[in-house]
Image: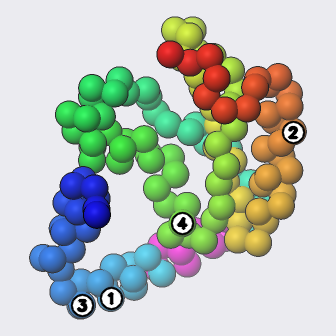
Amino acid sequence: AMHPVTRKIIGGARGLSAADAFNGLYALQAYKAKLAPIIASVDLFCVPTAPTHYALQAVLADPITTNSRHGTYTNFVNLLDMCGIAVPTGKRDDGLPMSVTLLGMVGKDWLTASLARDVHAMSALPLGATGWA
């Protein structure tokens, strides 16, 4: 069985041709080429994990938009052969959790995970979604 939202997203491809798919792949390769010097110049990126928090009701009402917005800072990671790990860093002023996502280059998973471990240790927060209502 497939979740209806997943079916809707995948179903959107029905209107695309093989030429559209290849044009998308060529565009991705062009973006990768432009970004290559920038990516090669850093060891890691540190970005916010998500731009906001949504109540469950908002996600249920518009799951595609809310989940797309949650990926504002990370939707490109798999496309660029990068790895990422979200690390809790504390609470916002309103009491909701906050975190950063560390993004590493291909083959640098160990570096990304190692730094994530250190950042998490400095936060002194427990593992998992404990204590959040």
SS majority, magenta: helix
Labelled pair 2, 3 in contact (Cβ < 8 Å)? no
Q: Within 10 angstroms of label 4, few (less than 14), some, or many (20 or more) residues?
A: few
Q: Amino acid at mark 4?
A: Asn
Between the C-alphas of marks 2 and 3, the distance is 45 Å
Residue located beneath label 2 in the image: 118
Residue located beneath label 3 in the image: 18
Q: Residue at x 28, y 56 (%)?
A: 3
Q: Within 10 angstroms of label 1, few (less than 14), some, or many (20 or more) residues?
A: few
Q: Position of residue 129 (x, y in %)?
A: 61, 28
Q: Amino acid at mark 1?
A: Phe
Q: Within 10 angstroms of label 2, few (less than 14), some, or many (20 or more) residues?
A: few
Residue located beneath label 1 in the image: 22
Comparing labels 4 and 1, the label whose residue is closer to the camera? 4
Q: Residue at x 52, y 9 (%)?
A: 94
Q: Amino acid at mark 2?
A: Asp
Labelled pair 2, 4 in contact (Cβ < 8 Å)? no
Farthest residue toward the front? 1
Q: Does label 1 or label 2 sit earlier along the sequence?
A: 1
Labelled pair 1, 2 in contact (Cβ < 8 Å)? no
Labelled pair 1, 3 in contact (Cβ < 8 Å)? yes
Residue located beneath label 4 in the image: 78
Q: Which residues are magenta?
A: 30-39
